[in-house]
């Protein structure tokens, strides 16, 4: 897997925090749970032991996944971008829905940082794919699950 993983500076920090939490706290608590379950004797019918081993596999898998992503990360600080007003990864875009006049702001982020509640959309989402490369004043059509929608790009910011 030689592909780079695009992350905003903020997204990389979130992944680093999660990795630190897994390595320092979760790993220790799983080891303690396994030791506790072992002290109960027969492991062949020990549900606590099986659950702790399953949790250990999950934690170790997630640690490996995060280390891989951070190792392959291409960290992008939106404040240093100079895309001449074009919508690019990590940019923040103000849009107006041309059907109902509703205004919304989205930041285009990596898959791991996407959170619609925080108006952060994945670079692979239909709306981000429609916006990439466009400029303020452009009208884009987005193939949304509810059908095609048209948006006008009001402003592109690098914040």
Image (cartoon, rainbow, N blue to C red):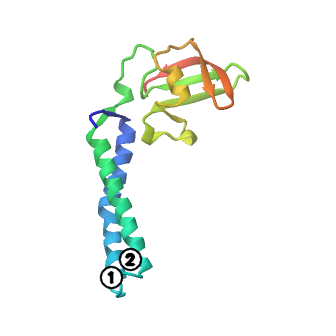
In the depicted structure, whether residue 5 falls above or below residue 49? above
Q: Quadrant of the N terminus?
A: top left
* Quarter of image, res 99: top right
In percent of width and height, residue 80 lies at: 34, 25
Q: Nearer the viewer, residue 110 or 152?
A: 110
For the residue carrying disc 1, how many other residues have a C-alpha within 10 Å: few (<14), some (14-19), or many (20+)? some
In the depicted structure, whether residue 157 falls above or below residue 42? above
User: Farthest residue toward the right?
Assistant: 100
User: Farthest residue toward the front?
Assistant: 44
Q: Which mark is residue 49?
A: 2
In percent of width and height, residue 131 lies at: 52, 21
> Going 47% across and 23% down the picture, which residue do you hit?
157
In percent of width and height, residue 115 lies at: 52, 41
Q: Quadrant of the C terminus?
A: top left
* Quarter of image, res 153: top right
> Going 38% across and 46% down the picture, which residue do you hit?
14
Badge count:
2
Does label 1 or label 2 sit earlier along the sequence? 1
In the depicted structure, whether residue 72 falls above or below residue 133? below
> Going 36% across and 22% down the picture, which residue do you hit?
81
- Element type at mark 2: helix
For the residue carrying disc 2, how many other residues have a C-alpha within 10 Å: few (<14), some (14-19), or many (20+)? many
Q: Which mark is residue 155?
A: none
In the depicted structure, whether residue 65 falls above or below residue 77? below
Q: Which mark is residue 38?
A: 1
In percent of width and height, residue 109 lies at: 44, 33
**Circles 1 and 2 in contact, beta carbons < 8 Å:** yes
């Amino acid at each position: 897997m030689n592909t780079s993983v695009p992350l905003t500076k903020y997204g990389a920090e979130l992944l680093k925090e999660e990795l630190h939490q897994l390595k320092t706290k979760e790993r220790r608590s799983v080891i303690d749970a396994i030791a506790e379950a072992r002290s109960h004797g027969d492991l062949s019918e020990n549900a606590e032991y099986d659950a702790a081993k399953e949790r250990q596999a999950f934690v170790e898998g997630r640690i490996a996944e995060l280390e891989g992503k951070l190792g392959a990360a291409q960290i992008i600080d939106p404040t240093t971008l100079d895309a001449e007003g074009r919508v690019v990864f990590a940019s923040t875009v103000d849009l107006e829905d041309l059907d109902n006049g509703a205004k919304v702001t989205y930041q285009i982020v990596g898959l791991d940082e996407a959170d619609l509640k925080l108006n952060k959309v994945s670079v692979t989402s239909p709306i981000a794919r429609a916006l990439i490369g466009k400029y303020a004043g452009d009208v884009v059509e987005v193939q949304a699950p509810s059908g095609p929608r048209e948006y006008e790009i009001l402003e592109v910011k690098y914040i």
